[in-house]
Amino acid sequence: GSVYNWIYKYSTYNKKGYKIVEMSSSSTQKLKDKDARIAELERLLGQKQIKIDYLEELIELAEEQYDVQFKKNSNTPRSK
């Protein structure tokens, strides 16, 4: 309310056909919360990817060391 009154009285933007939208503090807080949640999820995703890379490397080393294949071969038929 009061911001729009000030813009109407004193701002040059009002005369040039600009559309001013005032975000409520709750909308601003929601955006900040969403940004924080996105950052947290990206951090967790990065941690999971590091773990996956580590485990895949560990499997490869074990396969080489013990001459055993741990990963499934998709071309072999399933046993019944």
Image: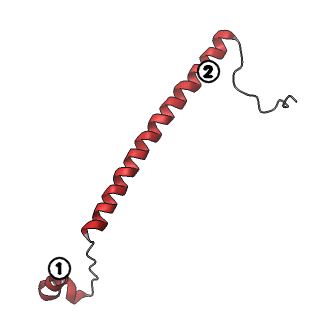
Question: Is the residue 24 above or below the residue 41 in the image?
Answer: below
Determine whether label 1 and label 2 are within 8 Å by CB: no
Q: Residue 28 location, x and y as percent?
A: 28, 64
Q: Please name the residue shown 69% across and 21% down the image.
A: 70
Residue type highlighted by circle 1: Val
Query: Which quadrant is home to the N terminus?
Result: bottom left
Q: In this image, 32 relative to 70: left or right?
A: left
Question: Is the residue 41 above or below the residue 34 in the image?
Answer: above
Q: In this image, 74 relative to 9: left or right?
A: right
Q: In this image, 69 relative to 38: left or right?
A: right
Give the residue at mark 1: 3
Give the residue at mark 2: 59
Q: In this image, 76 relative to 39: left or right?
A: right
Mark 1 to mark 2 CA distance (whole Å): 62 Å
Q: Quadrant of residue 68?
A: top right
Residue type highlighted by circle 2: Ile
SS of the residue at dot 1? helix
Q: Residue 37 location, x and y as percent?
A: 38, 51
